[in-house]
Image (cartoon, grey):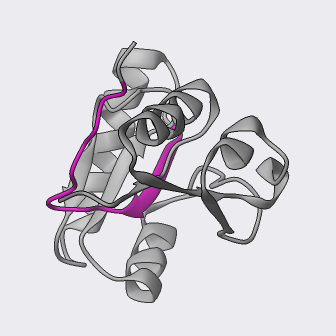
Amino acid sequence: MLRKVLIANRGEIAVRVARACRDAGIGSVAVYADPDRDALHVRAADEAYALGGDTPDPVSGADEVVAFAKENGLPIAIKAAFGGGRGLKVARTLDEIPELYDSAVREAVAAFGRGECFVERYLDRPRHVEPSA
């Protein structure tokens, strides 16, 4: 039985998920960056935890992505900053990061005219819960 949901999002969708959890009798946990400390989605959750720092700036190149992976572990996701998930590349080894980073940047430039990319840990088997309308 599902007892608690981690809401790793922000804004209106996170508020809707927290409210849907409450309606279903499920606990909700929000995580947030320091600038979002007083945001509505943080207040709407049953629990909230600061991740520390500011919001994730785009990486400056493949070397920074490799450093992130060494510090935080693999797999990682490399994704276009303006892509909404399009162009997502998953690196499972350090050796493939430069090629995947270059590919993500090329795809982002072609699709959005901008090549900035973010990097984050990739979750292989997350559970996704859609809130009801």
In this picture, residue 125 sits left or right of residue 34? left
Quadrant for the N terminus in the image: bottom left
The front one of 1 and 5 is 1
In the rendered view, would you say 26 is above or below 82?
A: below
Q: Residue 97 lies in magenta, yes or no?
A: no
Q: Position of residue 51 (x, y in %)?
A: 65, 69
Q: Residue furthest top?
A: 133
In the rendered view, would you say 37 is above or below 91?
A: above
Q: Residue 122 lies in magenta, yes or no?
A: yes
Residue drawn 22% across the image and 55% down it: 126
In which quadrant of the rendered view does residue 69 lie? bottom left
Query: Main structural element of the magenta stretch: helix, strand or loop?
Result: loop
In this picture, residue 1 sits left or right of residue 40? left
Q: Position of residue 72 (x, y in %)?
A: 43, 82
Q: Position of residue 2 (x, y in %)?
A: 24, 57
In which quadrant of the rendered view does residue 87 lie? top left
The front one of 84 and 101 is 84
Residue drawn 41% across the image and 26% down it: 83
In the rendered view, would you say 6 is above or below 117?
A: below
In this picture, residue 101 sits left or right of residue 51? left
In which quadrant of the rendered view does residue 27 lie? bottom left
Residue drawn 40% across the image and 12% down it: 133
The front one of 54 and 57 is 54
In the rendered view, would you say 50 is above or below 20?
A: below
The front one of 109 and 72 is 72
Q: Position of residue 97 (x, y in %)?
A: 27, 66
Q: Residue furthest bottom?
A: 71
Q: What span is colored magenta in the figure?
A: 116-131
Residue drawn 60% across the image and 55% down it: 46
What count of labels does the image hold?
Answer: 0
